[in-house]
Amino acid sequence: MWKNIIVEVREHTAYVTINRPDKLNALNKATLQELQEILGQLKVDIEVWGVLLSGTGDKAFVAGADIEEFVGLSATTSKELTSWVHQEIMDVLYHFPKPVIAAVNGFALGGGLELAMACHIRVASEQAKLGQPEVALGIIPGYGGTQRLPQLVGRGKAMEMILSGEMISATEALDWGLVNHVVPQEQLFSSCEKILEAIYRKSPQAVALAIDAVNRGLENPKSGYEREIAAFAEAVETQDFKEGVSAFLEKRKPNFR
């Protein structure tokens, strides 16, 4: 069905794989359009509880945007492109109501790193390399890198990565807080699946509310507290809350819907 992306659902997890190995899985507009449609479908699919995002092969997660498509861009068309990618893909991922884990299986550069940063959790293989090399092309990160990278690693380290354009290793990314875990390549998917399985045992309604509250606070700390209070109030009205409390008092595992 999809030309540039492979989608497979197994045991309630949607495995979404950017499939352009000859281009190191670079994001061209056609791939981004497919990703937009796929995310829209997965968001409402009740059989899908979470998403594992990766790239084909063991060389690259996503090596960046497809630079060939940048040739001849005007200020107007580039603004339209980046606005669309922000609103329809990166922000959708960032606010996705189900857990999304990026399995960083190789190079995550430029738009590829920005795609990974839009996910909720990042797990990298030991061979992964991460970076924002845009300044070497005379541009800057345009898919959220100047905003999400400082949130994850702090202003100083983000400035170093963005201004130098140099890549960092998976170990450095772990030390800096850019990824959650670094594992051997052969354990990458099983490590991601283990995290998702732990989340699946919890209330899906509470998970969605927690994602929203955390994101709201990062965007605006004051409104984040307000959203946490409102989300907590929403949670206590759900069937999941009743089931969770009953299971706790009855000393059994909860059976969430």
Image (spheres, helix red, strand yellow):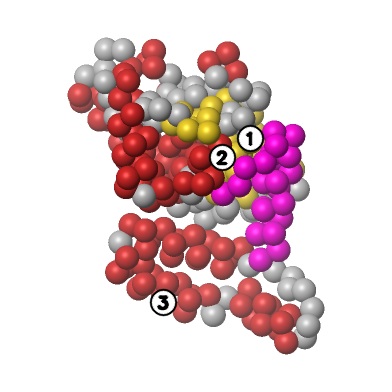
Mark 2 and mark 1 residues within 8 Å of each other at the beta carbon: yes
Does the segment drawn in magenta span residue 89?
no
Residue shown at 31% from the left, 12% from the top: 71
Amino acid under label 2? Thr
Mark drawn on residue 229: 3
- Residues under labels 3 and 1: Cα distance? 40 Å
- Badge 3 marks a residue whose secondary structure is helix
Q: What stretch is highlighted in magenta?
A: 179-202
Q: Which of marks 2 and 3 is in front?
A: 2
Q: Mark 2 points at which residue?
A: 171
Amino acid under label 1? Glu
Q: Quadrant of the C terminus?
A: bottom right
Q: Compared to 143, does 174 lie above or below?
A: below
Does the segment drawn in magenta span residue 201?
yes
- Badge 1 marks a residue whose secondary structure is loop
Front residue of 235 and 133 = 133
